[in-house]
Image (spheres, helix red, strand yellow):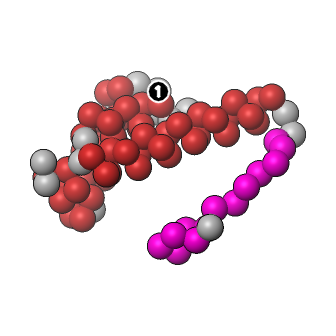
């Protein structure tokens, strides 16, 4: 399925249990990020960052969101519409 230039790729099997866990975690992060944008929810955006395996704390998640908002005006506008 193609939506706004994004192509969905269906993966039938992953090589290991670890890869399955990582894929599920990644999907959860992506779904939260999409929900954050749709709902203009800063709280959900921080949650999405915090759940990412490379982000070690909610504090870092908040700093990441603040940094992205400071550097990307269109992203900042998403959260200002509430």
Residue 70 visible somewhere in the drawing:
no
Residue 1 visible somewhere in the drawing:
yes
In the depicted view, which residue is nearer to us: 11 or 15? 11
Quarter of the image for the N terminus: give it.
Answer: bottom right
User: Residue most toward the bottom?
Assistant: 5
Please state the extent of the stretch shown in magenta in the rendering.
Answer: 2-14
Query: Is residue 1 highlighted in magenta?
Result: no
In the rendering, at what x and y percent does residue 47 appear?
A: 37, 32
Decide: is 33 above or below 19. below
In the rendering, at what x and y percent does residue 70 appear?
A: 21, 55
Which residue is identified by label 1? 56
In the depicted view, which residue is nearer to us: 35 or 80? 35
Residue at 46% of width from left, 27% of height from top?
Answer: 56
In the rendered structure, the answer to whether residue 10 lies left or right of residue 71 reads right
Q: Secondary structure at mark 1?
A: loop
In the rendering, at what x and y percent does residue 22 appear?
A: 67, 35
Residue at 22% of width from left, 56% of height from top?
Answer: 78
């Amino acid at each position: 399925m193609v939506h706004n230039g994004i192509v969905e790729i269906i993966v039938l099997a992953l090589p290991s249990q670890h890869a399955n866990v990582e894929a599920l975690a990644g999907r959860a992060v992506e779904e939260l990020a999409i929900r954050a944008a749709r709902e203009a929810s800063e709280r959900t955006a921080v949650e999405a960052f915090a759940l990412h395996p490379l982000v070690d704390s909610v504090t870092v998640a908040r700093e990441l969101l603040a940094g992205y908002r400071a550097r990307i005006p269109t992203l900042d506008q998403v959260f200002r519409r509430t």
